[in-house]
Image (cartoon, helix red, strand yellow):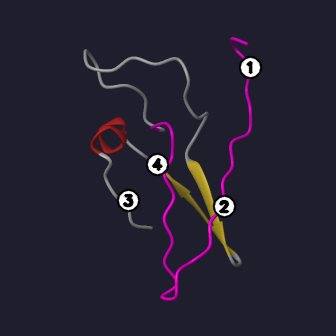
Amino acid sequence: NQGRTFEYSQSTTADSQGRYELTVPYSTEGPIANQTQFNTAPSGPYVLSYGDTTKEVKVSEEAVLKGEEIKV
């Protein structure tokens, strides 16, 4: 399975205030030198779509490790 690509997607429903939350499995910015190492990663930023809007979202490895919230 090495060298293969796959499509990852998930969906959610907004709460009563129009907010929603997603947890992503990998950073888009690659590993942290001398700290993390991995061979599986997105080929670019995550693409978030809602209504007629589409946004690209970059997620750092540090944000993944710390479980940080990224507001879009």
**Badge 2 is on which residue?**
11
Q: Earlier in the sequence, mark 2 or mark 4?
A: 2
Residue 42: % across, % down: 58, 35
Residue at numbered disc 3: 70
- The C terminus, quarter of image: bottom left
Of labels 4 and 1, earlier in sequence is 1
User: Which percent across, then down, holds residue 6?
Assistant: 74, 32
| Mark with earlier residue (2, 1) | 1
Per the image, label 4 sits on a secondary structure element best described as loop
Instruction: Tell me the crowding category of disc 3: few under 14, some 14 to 19, or many 20 or more residues within 10 angstroms, Cα based.
Output: few
Amino acid at pointer 4: Lys
Asked whether the beta carbons under mark 4 and mark 3 sit within 8 Å of each other, the answer is no
Q: Residue furthest top?
A: 2
**Which residue, given by chain and number where applicable, does mark 4 sit on?**
58
Q: Do the residues under discs 4 and 1 have CB atoms within 8 angstroms? A: no
Select label 2 or label 3 by which is in front: 2
Q: Residue at x 56, y 56 (%)?
A: 56
Pointers 1 and 3 in contact (C-beta within 8 Å): no
Which of the two marks, 2 or 4, is nearer to us in this view?
Answer: 2
The amino acid type, in three-letter code, at marker 2 is: Ser
Question: Which numbered disc, 4 or 3, marks the residue that appears first in the sequence?
Answer: 4
Residue segment shown in magenta: 1-27
Above or below residue 41? Residue 71 is below
